[in-house]
Amino acid sequence: MTIVILMYGPAHGRILTTEATEGEVLREAGWSYQLTDDVDERGRRIARAYTD
């Protein structure tokens, strides 16, 4: 399991746990959150928002 923090977009700051290792993490209301290799200061993977 991977702990992910969503950055930018309408769900900015939401934290979730996923089994995804790459690619799309979440889609909602015209936004996609793409999992990156970057981590924050707490070791959570960062998913960046993109409009669909």
Image (tube, rainbow, N blue to C red):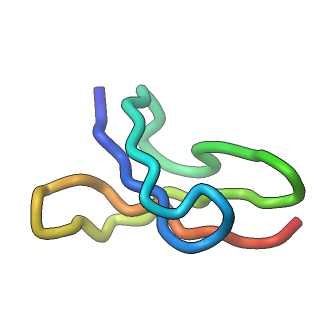
Compared with 46, 19 (above or below) is above
Residue found at x 13% / y 56%: 43
Pinpoint residue 26: horizontal percent, then vertical percent: 65, 43
- The quadrant the N terminus occupies is top left
Residue found at x 23% / y 53%: 44
Pinpoint residue 32: horizontal percent, then vertical percent: 73, 57
The residue closer to the viewer here, 51 or 11, is 11
Compared with 20, 35 (above or below) is below
**Is residue 48 rendered to the left or right of residue 5?**
right
**Is residue 5 rendered to the left or right of residue 32?**
left
Residue found at x 42% / y 26%: 19
Compared with 16, 41 (above or below) is below
Pinpoint residue 22: horizontal percent, then vertical percent: 49, 49
Pinpoint residue 16: horizontal percent, then vertical percent: 41, 36
The residue lying furthest to the left in this view is 42
- The quadrant the C terminus occupies is bottom right
Marks counted in the figure total 0
The residue closer to the viewer here, 23 or 28, is 28
Residue found at x 56% / y 73%: 8
